[in-house]
Image (tube, rainbow, N blue to C red):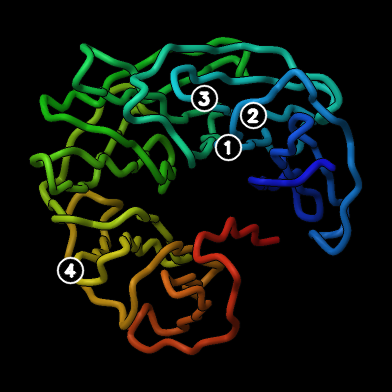
């Protein structure tokens, strides 16, 4: 019996979304045309057996992207027919001690696509790179964030204004402690800087959310290290949520958070007060806001 083990979702337009699910018989692609109320299976990709780390859709097109990772190989697949057929367009050997279980595609307003990829320098250090495409995912270039540290993850890529992109770099401080910091690009992901705030032992989850007034929030599993910015990520101020955040997103003036204890909260006053609205079976939620 085929059993699902992993699910990733992405939005195409105001009503349409795609989902990729890992099954024992391969990756299954599903599509919803009614804001996620119901789903139909598009295809079974029996040749893709690695863990799906991300699914992406180029807005208002039938181009669907998959990122997968095994213990030692990272791959990107592209479909131009709405998830029926996929072609391998990117692949790299990765450091087996790191691996990726969760990532995301960020499609910039210019059409440039950015995601993350691990790449080894030696057998003890995994240095993470931004993976970037300017041709709708048909080919990829690999851009190191410029850190001399020992990063093992780059997450939460978001475009907050035209060409201004934020990401989170998580890296080793020592054998028992890790760090996280904001990475910022003002040229659509070509070069990166670090605004200067570092979180100690941030936990396994970090995420960004931006309100309609431009205010940006960054949250991690350790709530004492949450941040906000009012100038597109150039400077940051600390803030504290009353819980540990697993995922943070926003719609217009509302913040939406899933927590590490599997609850969902909303805030309509920029994170000052929160209201619990639901509980979940999993703290890590892929939110799609239509």
User: What is the CA distance from the residue labelled 1 to the residue labelled 4?
Assistant: 29 Å
User: What is the CA distance from the residue labelled 2 to the residue labelled 4?
Assistant: 35 Å
How far from the left and from the top, in percent, is residue 112? Answer: 52, 25
Which residue shows up at 17% across the image and 65% down it?
Answer: 237
Q: Nearer the viewer, residue 221 or 212?
A: 221
User: What is the CA distance from the residue labelled 2 to the residue labelled 3?
Assistant: 13 Å
Q: Which residue is mark 2?
A: 66
Which residue shows up at 81% across the image and 29% down it?
Answer: 83
Tell me if residue 262 comes above or below residue 147 in the rendering: below
Mark 1 or 4: the one toward you: 1
Q: Which residue is mark 4?
A: 238
Counting residues from the N terminus, which is met first, the one under dot 3 or under dot 4?
3
Cβ atoms at labels 2 and 1 below 8 Å apart: yes
Q: How many marks do you count on the picture? A: 4
Q: Which residue is mark 3?
A: 70
User: What is the CA distance from the residue labelled 1 to the residue labelled 3?
Assistant: 13 Å
What is the number of the mark on residue 1? none
How far from the left and from the top, in percent, is residue 210? Answer: 43, 60
Instruction: Determine the secondary structure under disc 1.
Output: strand
Counting residues from the N terminus, which is met first, the one under dot 1 or under dot 3?
1
How far from the left and from the top, in percent, is residue 120? Answer: 28, 15
């Amino acid at each position: 019996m085929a059993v699902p083990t992993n699910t990733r979702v992405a939005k195409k337009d105001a009503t349409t979304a795609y989902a990729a699910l890992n099954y024992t018989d391969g990756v299954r692609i599903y599509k919803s045309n009614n804001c996620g109320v119901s789903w139909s299976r598009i295809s079974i990709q029996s040749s893709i057996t690695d863990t799906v780390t991300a699914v992406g859709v180029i807005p208002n097109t039938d181009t669907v992207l998959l990122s997968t990772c095994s213990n030692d190989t990272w791959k990107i697949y592209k479909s131009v027919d709405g998830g029926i057929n996929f072609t391998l367009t990117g692949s790299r050997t990765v450091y087996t001690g790191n691996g990726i279980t969760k990532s995301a595609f960020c499609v910039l307003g210019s059409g440039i696509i950015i995601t993350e990829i691990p790449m080894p320098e030696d057998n003890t250090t995994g240095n993470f790179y931004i993976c970037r495409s300017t041709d709708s995912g048909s080919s990829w270039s690999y851009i190191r964030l410029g850190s001399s540290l020992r990063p093992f993850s780059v997450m939460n890529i978001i475009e907050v204004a035209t060409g201004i992109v934020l990401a989170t770099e998580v890296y080793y401080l020592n054998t028992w402690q890790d760090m996280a910091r904001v990475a910022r690009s003002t040229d659509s992901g070509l070069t990166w800087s670090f605004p200067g705030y570092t979180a100690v032992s941030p936990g396994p989850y970090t995420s960004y959310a931006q309100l309609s007034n431009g205010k940006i929030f960054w949250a991690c599993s350790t709530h004492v290290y949450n941040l906000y910015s009012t100038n597109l990520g150039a400077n940051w101020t600390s803030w504290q949520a009353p819980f540990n955040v697993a995922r943070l997103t926003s719609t217009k003036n509302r913040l939406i958070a899933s927590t590490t204890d599997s609850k969902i909260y909303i805030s309509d006053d920029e994170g000052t007060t929160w209201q619990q609205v639901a509980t979940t079976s999993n703290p890590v939620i892929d939110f799609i806001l239509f």
